[in-house]
Amino acid sequence: MDRLILHEDPISGNCYKIRLVAAHVGVPIERRSYAVLKGETRTREFLARVNANGRIPVLQIGDRFLPESGAACVYLADGASLIPSDRFERADMFRWMFFEQYSHEPNVATLRFWRAFVGEDQLSAAQRALIPGKRAAGDAALDLMDTHLQTHAFFVGERLTLADIALYAYTHVAGEGGFDLARWPAVAAWCARVAAQPGHIGFDA
Amino acid sequence: MDRLILHEDPISGNCYKIRLVAAHVGVPIERRSYAVLKGETRTREFLARVNANGRIPVLQIGDRFLPESGAACVYLADGASLIPSDRFERADMFRWMFFEQYSHEPNVATLRFWRAFVGEDQLSAAQRALIPGKRAAGDAALDLMDTHLQTHAFFVGERLTLADIALYAYTHVAGEGGFDLARWPAVAAWCARVAAQPGHIGFDA
């Protein structure tokens, strides 16, 4: 099998998703750290060699580079039970993964990054102006998740899939962005359920 | 096979993606139209029956509802050549589909919607403040695509996949959002290539 190297920033939930999938499927990956806050993913070398998009994570598979956390999760989980074999369930898993990247991550993860890592007093006026919209959209994403989880143990097919891993990464630390999970009890219970799965590893593992 | 109904707004590129995939794989779908601009996807009935997220498109498969354009494309293309059989290529297809939803659509599609459908004079001050950031991010997304397409005929595996369809939908009408494709000649040539594929249908088909 090709050597796997995860180009990442340890504070990124998008990177944690990939480590969590690798742990569940039992595939060892090496890790290379870059500090986003120090601009280490915008250097000429990173842009030329790892990702022209200047973003992490990137999963290196031999000499090929795969950006986008969702794509890396799909690669690693290929053939594993984390991807449902049923056609509708598999598409429904992608439904939640796209929802996470479009409606959840830009709000829940960005507010966490700004508040817990950049610092609110360091934000630009333009960033500050975005906070109310991101707060409302993050609340709406958590509302939608909570409604679903009131009647389901997991997002798809009543068992752990990539949909849960994609949504867990930033949801379980949403408090760092000022989203108090006590407001969304079904989400909080699901977080505990995901963390109790065999093979689970924590953010700092 | 289950009856397929696309809940959509005909002006939405996200909905067009699904019709384009259905045309390529030769699967008939019925269409139900809702006008986003008239709030028809925010009615109590729509939220309760079609999508609690208040968004289109939603692909109805029998009595099940599948939101998110990418998920609907995956469902329809299951087993077709639009999804590569090679493990890396399949993950790489999802790489571009996630890139489209995260880095392209919120910029290129939103500016088109505001300019061509809402009207710039109807925008709120908060929306207006977002324009420069979305313009720069849309430019960056098109730059990245152009660089890739300077050495590739299609995004993945040198043939049409869901990655091309996902990116084509809003790129070929990017001019309506003020992105002049003459600045990105490899992107413009790829648009022509996608439109020339057997089975292709236009936005208004």
Image (cartoon, coloured by chain):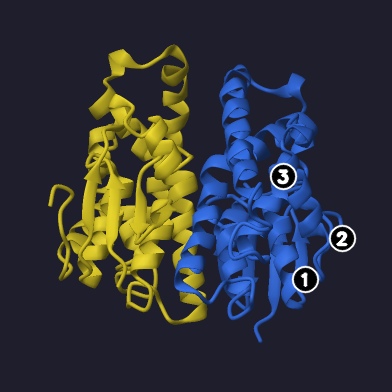
Chain colours: A yellow, B blue
Disc 3 to disc 2, C-alpha distance: 26 Å
Q: Is residue B57 visible?
A: no
Chain letter of mark 1 equals B
* Front tag of 3 and 2: 3
Q: Amino acid at mark 3?
A: Ala
The first of marks 3 and 2 along the sequence is 3
Which residue is under mark 2? B205
Q: Is residue A113 above or below residue A181?
A: above
Marks 2 & 1, CB-CB < 8 Å contact: yes
Which residue is under mark 3? B186
Front residue of this view, candidates A103 and A51: A51
User: What residue do we see at 69% from left, 75% from top?
Assistant: B4
User: Looking at the picture, how far across and down is residue B202, in whole percent?
Assistant: 84, 57
Which residue is under mark 1? B23
Q: Secondary structure at mark 1?
A: helix
Q: Secondary structure at mark 3?
A: helix
User: Looking at the picture, how far across and down is residue B152, in whole percent?
Assistant: 64, 55
Q: Amino acid at mark 1?
A: Ala
Q: Amino acid at mark 2?
A: Ala
Mark 2 neighbour class, 10 Å CA radius: few under 14, some 14 to 19, many 20 or more: few
User: Horizontally, is B120 left or right of A164 in the view?
Assistant: right
The first of marks 2 and 1 along the sequence is 1
Discs 2 and 1 carry the same chain letter: yes
